Amino acid sequence: MSLVAGWDQALSEIVLLSLQVTLSAVFVSCLIGLPLGAMVGAFRFPGRRPAILIMNVLMGLPPVVVGLMVYLMLSASGPMGVLGLLYTPTAMIIAQTVLVTPIVAALSRQVVEDLHQEYSEQFTSMGVGPLQRIMALLWDARFSLLTVVLAGFGRAVAEVGAVMIVGGNINHVTRVMTTAIALETSKGDLELALALGLVLLLIALLVNLVVMTVRGTAARASYA
Amino acid sequence: MREVATLRTVLSQNVIDAAIAPPLMTARGLGCSIKGQRLVRDVDLTIRQGRRTVVLGPNGAGKSVLLRLLHGLLPASEGTVLWRGNPLGADAQDGQAMVFQRPVMLRRSVLANLNFALKVRGFRGPERARRAAQALEMAGLDHLAKRPARVLSGGEQQRLAIARALATGPDLLLLDEPTASLDPAATARIEALIGQAHASGVTIVMVTHDRGQAQRLADDVVFLQDGRLAESGPASTLLHSPRSDAVRAWLDGRLFVTTPQTQP
Ligand SMILES: Nc1ncnc2c1ncn2[C@@H]1O[C@H](COP(=O)(O)OP(=O)(O)OP(=O)(O)O)[C@@H](O)[C@H]1O
Ligand SMILES: [Mg+2]
């Protein structure tokens, strides 16, 4: 098939940028979302219910809306306009981070809350402090949280609306798999679109396989 | 004749011990209500230094609730608990350790479970390693150190839970039915562990349903029925000549029901 022949410079550039943007966004989202989710999951504080509600609502934010918001922030007349980030990969990372952080926070909140149910009294009995509690819960839930991270990755890598708006789909600069697929399809170049679509599918499959294997091993060792 | 005399001195020695051992923990008029339900009420008791207090009573009598109250996990709605002479505060768990009815195993290895408990209490470096190794040996779990704690058998988990509780060197160890659902051999190992802890000066409070165990381990007995103290005192008296109907019925293996039941 011409798919292999079609694996050229342009294609790999697009795939690599996609992965770079998405992985960066997922990484930043975890840095923010995991501790946030763990804190809301483990601690009781006034306003906790509304916080959970907001997290759950944000989880379903339409990507184009996120794209528009980030666009307004980064555009020349926006509050962060001076940074000149619009139409750069950084802008796409920001947009995807906004999109993925609520997912990581909301899902990890649930995971951590369930584990904390089991650990809470034991931790109090041992004299575990708040910070230690969060760290220990995140560590002991690590295999369940892998699925959470995967969900975030899946959402980011497949998303087209937000990166299109803030990235602009500029060739060699901000063109990623999803925006390229959209463009090539509209141009009628179905071959490249299909090739990219297949790569996207393959990545999703691969990531899922890895996570399933790791979780399976962990479950057999009773760590999950 | 000699035997009687010996028995008398043993008995009186026990009574004297009970009187002179300083109280580690005292509860006065202790009660706990959750959602309008009075789970425990009017409990007066004294836990004396270095002694083993066994808590008895039927299912749902409030034994686990009482342990949680003493450990500061549940707030008292009535009465007071004094711990080393001071009201039980935020530092309730300092110097105490509790093993729960369903032991909580962290999703880590056996050794990591011990290390975590030690780290939390501020043990570092070689001292932590020494204590962890000692705990492993005491629990007879050396060969399982690297095993995930949650794959251990019930008896092994219970031994790990006790060793983990003792590793940090508490003054008081609270045990909630540590041998429920264990076979006689596993029970004997747990009792040996408890005996070792007691011999090294740890004060023990333990819930059990096992009359034989109470007889083997108890210095003092507390009998709960429907959230109230039915009777308490030295084991030698309570287990042999109880004053209350509740304890007498329990010793006879009869069902003791406080509220009259209508015949079907
Ligand atoms: N957190 C709680 N909220 C509401 N009710 C509770 C709570 N904890 C215990 N109870 C109730 O208090 C009563 C006493 O419970 P507890 O667990 O102390 O019994 P127990 O004497 O330990 O019984 P068992 O021998 O079965 O372990 C029970 O009726 C139980 O349902
Ligand atoms: Mg109980």
Image (cartoon, rainbow, N blue to C red):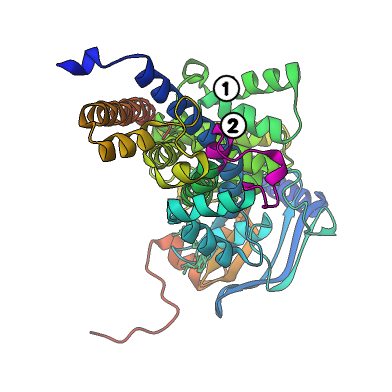
Q: Is residue A153 visible in the rendered structure shown here?
A: yes
From the image, tell me which residue sits under label 2: B163
**Which is more toward the observer, A133 or B86?**
A133
Residue A42 placement, left or right of B171: left
Residue type, label 2: Ala
**Which is more toward the observer, B34 or B101?**
B34
Residue at 54% x, 32% y is: A89
The kind of secondary structure element at disc 2 is helix
Q: Is residue B177 visible in the rendered structure shown here?
A: no
**From what the image shows, is residue A19 above or below residue B221?**
above
Residue A183: say if magenta: no
Disc 1 to disc 2: CB gap under 8 Å: yes
Q: State the image coordinates of residue A148 (x, y, percent, origin top left).
A: 43, 41
Q: CA distance from mark 1 to mark 2?
A: 7 Å
Range of residues picked out in magenta: A74-94
**Which is more toward the observer, A172 or B78?**
A172
Quarter occupied by the N terminus of chain B: top right
